[in-house]
Image (spheres, helix red, strand yellow):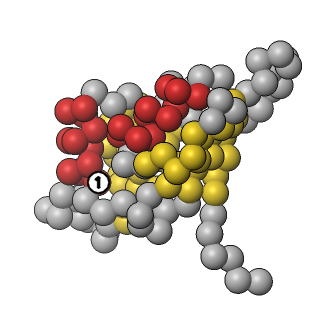
Amino acid sequence: MNIIGSTIVFTVDDLASSRRFFTTHLGFREVLDSPDFTWLSRDDAVADVLLHQRDLERPRERIAQPVVAFAVTDLAREHERLRAEGAPIVGRLRRTPWGEWLLRLTDPNGIVVELTEWIAPGGHPDGS
């Protein structure tokens, strides 16, 4: 098998607010937009995101909170940019015990977006 692309699909209550979040704060662009779904992409190697409008006539099922993680470079700079934009950052930029820096955002529909950067032991995401 040769996988040549990936798409992450999220079912959301408010399609427009999630579309704004991903295009404003994470640099995605609209490829296709319809009343039922929006396909978002970037020019780098990240997976595409498909936002699907939840059928509001059906009862909401109990599902796990959706999470998508993106590995980035210069997370400290991204943290400052996102903070200046007023992005919905959850918690603080922190280092995990297994050697990565982690920042979490939450989109208006509850999608948790983790931005991560691997750092050498003892290092900081700003290179110091």
Q: Secondary structure at mark 1?
A: helix
Q: Amino acid at mark 1?
A: Leu
Residue 5 placement (x, y as % from top left)? 62, 69
Q: Would you place residue 105 above or below residue 44 in this image?
A: above
Q: Would you place residue 15 above or below residue 48 in this image?
A: above
State the residue at coordinates (57%, 46%).
32
Quadrant of res 109:
top right
Q: To which residue does mark 1 refer? A: 75
Q: Is residue 57 or residue 72 the one in the foreground?
A: 57
Residue 15 placement (x, y as % from top left)? 59, 28
Residue 38 placement (x, y as % from top left)? 59, 40
State the residue at coordinates (41%, 41%).
23
In the picture, measured across the screen, residue 25 lies left or right of residue 50, that is: left
Quadrant of the snapshot with the N terminus: bottom right
In the picture, measured across the screen, residue 64 lies left or right of residue 88, that is: right
In the picture, measured across the screen, residue 100 lies left or right of residue 123, that is: right
Using a 10 Å C-alpha cutoff, classify the residue at mark 1 as few (fewer than 14 neighbours), some (14 to 19) or many (20 or more). many
Q: In the displayed image of the protein, which residue is found farthest to the bottom?
A: 1
